[in-house]
Amino acid sequence: MKYPEPLQKGDKIAVTAFSSGVPSGCHQRLDLVLEHLRSLGFNVIEGHCLRENEKHVSATPSMRAEELMKFLCDDSIAAVAPPWGGEFAMDLLPLLDFEKLKQVKPKWVFGFSDVSTISSVLTTQLGWSTLHSSNLMELNPLEKDELTANTLNVMTAKAGAEITQFSSELYQVAGESFETHPNCCLNKTERTQWKVVGDVEELRFSGRLIGGCFDTMVHLIGTEYLDLERFKQCYSNDGLILYLENAEMPPTVLRRALQGLKYQGVFEQISGLLFGRNAVLDNCGKAITSSEAFLSVANDLKVPVLYDVDIGHLPPNLALFNGAHAEVHFKDGKGKVIQTLR
């Protein structure tokens, strides 16, 4: 696994929206987080594909891909930071030159949601470690949540380092709008409780991390872009931990998506599954809940499964290094993840 060089003061961070752009109503929030980066000593480079958003994208697929390639191929840049996710990062995959990217230094790419459409593929295609974490737009300098506030700091770790994170105490269900409250922080109101599938109180498993937003992963897993079987062969002694989170799929769609992975044999290729808190909070007019949909498939899996983990659209988010070796510990509703950057 190739880890980018540790992030440090003076480094260049390129900001580009390779999925949804930032509309004018949220520019005040964007300026706030960019100024925060500058105050920490980073050299911020704004891309052209950033401050507009039309039909869920910042620009055409070719423009977004060209700008992302430019930043990824520039070895003076240390990190590429999308403001947030979106809908159509998948547009870029056939436009990226992975052979060319194999010749350049790995860069930090971080965030969650549709960011993971790109970051997970950079890991499986190039062997770069990328970071599934809080999005840039969440990095308010006033943020007190430990997992969120530590996002940039984890990227200062060197290859070989060990990073330990613990489950949160509280999480957010309903946050304030960046447009109407540009200085808002997380509104954590609900008690965090990781859950386990099966009648066990304590659990431990390990493997190499890979995953992201299930809404897009379901369309990528098994393709040339996210070939988990091939990725597993690179780390056959370690095994894989797949992590997923549902942003928008109604319960019936979620159940079919999980069944699809099961029929593909995906769950036979992994040594454990982490599933984030489900962001779809109602039944969407269906006769089953999201939890029932998940458990109807998860109960039959032959691997350790934890759910309601700190991953996804009900923050905070763990900072998970794609490709890193992780030990996951669970006991009495609490979790610990120890990642080794090897």
Image: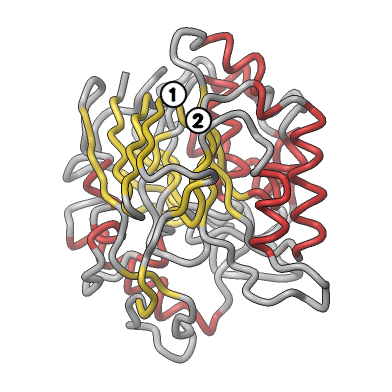
Residue 246 location, quadrant: bottom right
Name the quadrant containing residue 93.
top right
Q: Are marks 2 and 1 in contact (CB under 8 Å)?
A: yes
Q: Which residue is mark 1?
A: 207
Screen quadrant of the N terminus:
top left
Query: Of residues 152 and 80, which is closer to you in this image?
Result: 152
**Which residue lies most toward the front here?**
199
Residue located at (59% from left, 40% from top): 118
- With respect to residue 202, does 283 lie above or below? below
* Residue name at image x 66 percent, y 17 percent: 229
Q: Earlier in the sequence, mark 2 or mark 1?
A: 1
Tag 1, which secondary structure? strand
Report which residue position mark 2 lands on. Answer: 241
In the image, is 215 to the left or to the right of 178?
right
Residue in view at x 74 percent, y 74 percent: 283
Q: Is residue 58 visible?
A: no
Q: In this rendering, does residue 59 appear at all?
A: yes
* Left/right of residue 325 with respect to residue 16 in the rendered view: left
| Residue type at the position of mark 2 | Ile
The residues bearing labels 2 and 1 have C-alpha atoms spaced at a distance of 5 Å
Residue 342 placement: quadrant: top left
Q: Nearer the viewer, residue 340 or 202?
A: 202
Q: Tell me if mark 1 has few (under 14), some (14-19) or many (20+) residues whose alpha carbon lies within 10 angstroms of its own.
A: many
Q: Tell me residue 10's x, y (percent).
A: 19, 44
